[in-house]
Amino acid sequence: MSDPILDHDALDECLRLVAAEAASYLGEVDEALVRPPQPPEAVTGIDSPLSEEGAGSLEALRTLIDAADVAATRSAGPRFFHFVMGGGTPAALGADWLASALDQIAFNWVSSPLAMRLEQISVDWLKELFGLPAAWSGVLTTGATTANFTGLAAARRWWGLQHGVDVEEQGLSGLPPVPVLASGYIHASAIKALMMLGIGRQQVRTFESDATGRLDANALEQALRGLEGAPAILVATAGDVNAGGFDPIAAMGDLAEEHGAWLHVDGAFGLFAAVSPSTRDLVSGIDRAHSVAVDGHKWLNVPYDCGAAFVHDAELHRGAFTAGAAYFGREEPDRPVFSFLAPEMSRRARAFAVWATLRAYGRSGYRAMVERHLQLAQRLGEQIEASPELELLEDVALNVVCFRFRPPGVAEGELDELNRRLGQAVLDDGRVFFGTTVYGGKVAFRPAIVNWRTRPEDVDLVVPTVLELAASLVQPARR
């Protein structure tokens, strides 16, 4: 096989082959071990030298399917509780396949009017779902990192204009450092975004009332007063990844208004608290933010990768990303060029999956799923509290359950290493899947319930699996 055109007639068979294998994989994923049976290094056929003459599409796909069968993590399944990762709803997965087949270029209305219109509708639906003002600007991104980057880029533009400088034209040279203030909840993706924007990691000042990272609001207010009216960026976290905690968004909105600061909210998964009346208060004041970031491949349950950014001022948003070239042409104001609202110029049509899943299940469907997950998280928290060998390290605020193994007779100084070993044992075992973190200075676990497939019987595996594996670690030491 050489020129791909010679493979033209194999296209239909390729799609049928992949569809059949995908159906088989997804039909077994509910009960499958999450960990892959073998590491990719053990898989034959995928690391051969690049051949002069290709193998052809069917042979290449069969090799890839064989590799996936033994080396792919079953992360689409209901017991993958690591990294706050969702799956892909039936509607989202089908639409994502369609997006690949149609291969739309989500750049502007000339490249794909359909992709642009679907994104326009999807962004409006998401604003409605989250309680954000309809007039805000919005765009789909690759995930929360680029969503944070997008919102904070708009903030950087605003900050520069406060100093009389268009930083997109002139850069940051000669300007003072950008003050960024946050609680200890601030996520690595927001810090990475600040780094990429040239603001710098070291400009982030955190104000914590305890070892868990909770905001010290008084210290934050004093720091703002110390700036004496100089513009600053506040970063609030809606859904701390360790235990699901929330910064007081409304109170931070008050401080932003009083001191003329920009409030950015990283709501990667926690923004979905707005969907349920039982948790909506956690994001009270979200409409007073200036920019908001959220993930789609978390609680929205669309396939990787997807996120969204929202900015209160369309001009600031557009000004942070607009680019020009003679062949771009001009666009009408009511037809936003989404490539001028985010870092990427070349963009996959992610709106297919977002539109399809929101159209398929609606507001009530997402409310039902979120509330089911909230109940499952409470259920797991109660099971942990009922076990004398486990310690719940924080009340369950949303869908993340933070706990550790704490058996009697083991000294506090030995618990961190014991829990690290137990965390690795959980990953290696694969019946349930979650890793370790450090919360309040203690090594802990943080399973997150966010996959649309997850049922009570999946959650009920966590405690017995942990205790079974833990017994094998502590028994030899007691002999």
Image: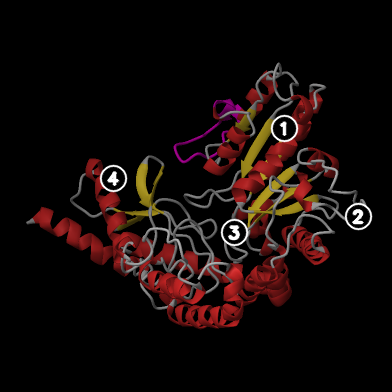
- Real-space Cα separation, disc 4 to disc 1, in angstroms: 40 Å
Label ID, residue 156: 1
Whether residue 251 sits left or right of residue 65 in the image: it is right
Residue wearing tag 2 = 334
Q: Amino acid at mark 4?
A: Asp
- Dot 4 surroundings within 10 Å: few (below 14), some, or many (20 or more)? some
Of the residues tagged 3 and 1, which is closer to the observer?
3
Of the residues tagged 2 and 1, which is closer to the observer?
2
Q: Position of residue 381 (x, y in %)?
A: 43, 62
Q: Secondary structure at mark 3?
A: loop
Counting residues from the start of the chain, the first of labels 4 and 1 encountered is 1
- Real-space Cα separation, disc 3 to disc 4, in angstroms: 33 Å
The one of 337 and 289 positioned closer to us in this rendering: 337
The one of 348 and 246 positioned closer to us in this rendering: 348
Image quadrant of residue 265? top right
In the image, what residue occupies the spot 70% across and 28% down? Answer: 232
